[in-house]
Image (cartoon, rainbow, N blue to C red):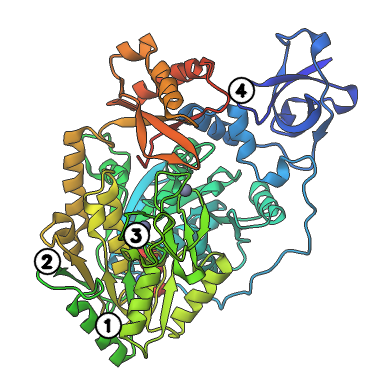
Amino acid sequence: MQIVRVALDLPLHRFFDYLVPESEMVSAGDVGLRVRVPFGRQSKIGILVELAQASDIPVAQLKSIEAVLRDLSPLPADWFRLSEFCAAYYQVPLGEVMLTTLPAGLRRIHPPKARGSRRLTKAPPPHDAPTLTAEQMSALATMANAGPGFHAYLLHGVTGSGKTEVYLRLVERALAAGKQALLLVPEINLTPQLEARVTARFPTAGLVSLHSELSEAARTRNWRAAHEGTARIVLGTRLAIFTPMPELGLIIVDEEHDSSFKQQDGMRYSARDVAVFRALERGVLIVLGSATPSLESWANATDGRIPARYTLLTLRERAVASARLPVVQRIDTRREKLSDGLSGALLLAIEKRLARGEQSLIFLNRRGYAPVLACTVCGWISHCTRCAANLVLHLADGRLRCHHCGFEAHVPKACPTCGNQDIQPFGRGTQRLESILAERFPRARLLRVDRDSAKSRKQWEILVAKIYSGEADILVGTQMLAKGHDFPKLTLVGALGADAALFASDWRSPERLFAQLMQVAGRAGRAELPGEMLIQTQFPDHPLYAALVRHDYPAFADEQLKEREQAGFPPYSSQAMLRAEAPQIADALAFLTTARAWPEAVAHPAVTLYDPVPMRLARRANLERAQLLIESPSRRALQAFLSAWCHLINSIKASSRLRWHLEVDPLEF
Ligand code: ADP
Ligand code: ZN
Ligand code: ZN
């Protein structure tokens, strides 16, 4: 009887042995096929990973494979290596990595039948390539001269500098060489735009997109086209990094700094980092592009002491000469009495835009009407009963809503504690800002763009079309509006409430703030009209704002990196976070304490384990959460430590209501 090893989606660090019945005999070339196997009382889809000589389990106890699925050609060897890398780096069982990164349609026993035929998106008008600017040309020449093989580039270019055009030229070169190209973007919302642009340039390349809003059948079909090589261009969000592509020749990660590349549950991977590994392993070109690179990537490209893995390419000027960068100004709000949170200078600037028929965008990164509802008589505040957080007032639909667990309640007519009828919203969110502006500018057409007004991609597209066609005068929006869109009539951006992020306890928050402000600023004045950004702040002299005024990302990044180095934070150290949650905080802390007490951990020369602490938002959805930070100056030492430690953690006996996970390279604290 033939014996094979099968990877299954189970939280166990091992494979499973099965017998192969006569009728299904396999050969070495079948490794990588999917198989259906009995497991417990059900069947599961697994992946054939190895033909085995023998099994540790007596043959009499082995079960037989039910079927070898030959509808899909075997998963290739490089896909196995990619899965192995992720399993080892993120400390996740290999079977889990392999199965969860496949489209659901390929790992289910009964996938839903595809309905209808392939929906063809309207073919956009063919698009001629513009003549390259000198900077674009020089960036492309550098990459072309590097020759074949692995090369990693960080393409740093201000918004509108023509990074996308550089990507398109690289894709053109890859296609001409008979290669496939993989383009990663952070947000589903950004795919239709880029998809249209890429298809217009390469109408016959069989571009497919891959993201989580596709139907299961469509995702499977697109994935299969990439795997079979009929799709020459794959455009997708983070999950697309795992798509097998036999002739992969180019990987592009656009907006590489964006935190959407980080998966926040299951296997907590960074698609950007996985992409770099994949390019290295496949020996191909990778380009990470951004106007505000992550500090990790910046250090990788500029700090001579870090063995430089990326080559820096810079686009300083906007591609269209007339589209100058917006003028950024600070409005010192200490010197002026604001009315409803708005300064005179900002109101005046909006008025001017209205008179000229141009658009303004007021950026406030807080959705809802007000962050909290409170009783001024007894001190009651709208608190989430399940989280250590306040319920946000959403006046538009008359609800109080928790932004952490989704809990909802009616807005009470009176204080639930003392009966006072005069309960007050405190602070301002986008909804309130919208009504304040509507009152001030009664003739202006207002449009609010946040996750409440653009819940689905469809709604989002409708809003974008409205802005584009000039059906709105004043936009109120969160960071949703910051990314990627050109609005030709938008010439003013006002930023409110930015200061909070300057002093937030998360040391990455200045980095995020700078990127966000730089991106929203980039929305203003992209076409023929010059743009202006006004930042309301009580800290106008803060170096972050000073760098922003000069559009000087390098100055900001270098300053931040100095601080990081002094504090020993990444990229000058590597981190991992062990988190536990349980109904009682004591249980979560006890679990972490047990994990920390492992003698090898305590005594490890290169790895520091900090004390377990409750998380900043300690209670969420009725679970108490605690975390333990692990840090090392050496990534390799940390990795070696984690893989040994993980086995120990797995053996800790904890209550069945306790959940834990390990996150490597955590982004949020
Ligand atoms: P980025 O991706 O850096 O934001 P894009 O590639 O989208 O920049 O370019 C910004 C705008 O400039 C687009 O409208 C694009 O069509 C145009 N553009 C890019 N490169 C050139 C060029 N070489 N000549 C003329 N226009 C260009
Ligand atoms: Zn009260
Ligand atoms: Zn809650």
Residue to which mark 4 is pinned: 12
Q: Please name the amino acid that badge 3 sits on.
A: Cys
Under circle 4, the secondary element is loop
Q: Quadrant of the N terminus?
A: top right
Q: Quadrant of the C terminus?
A: top left
First reached walking from the N terminus: tag 4 or tag 3 = 4
Quarter of the image for residue 78 reads top right
The residue at the point 38 percent across, 75 percent down is 434
Front position among marks 2 and 3:
3
Query: Which sits in the foreground, 364 or 72?
Result: 364
Cα gap from disc 4 to disc 1, whole angstroms: 59 Å
First reached walking from the N terminus: tag 2 or tag 3 = 2
Front position among marks 4 and 3:
3
Front position among marks 4 and 1:
1
Cα gap from disc 4 to disc 3, whole angstroms: 52 Å
Residue to which mark 2 is pinned: 334
Residue 375 is labelled as 3
Query: Is the CB of the residue bearing disc 3 within 8 angstroms of ligand 2?
Result: yes
Residue to which mark 1 is pinned: 350
Q: Please name the amino acid that badge 1 sits on.
A: Ile
First reached walking from the N terminus: tag 4 or tag 1 = 4
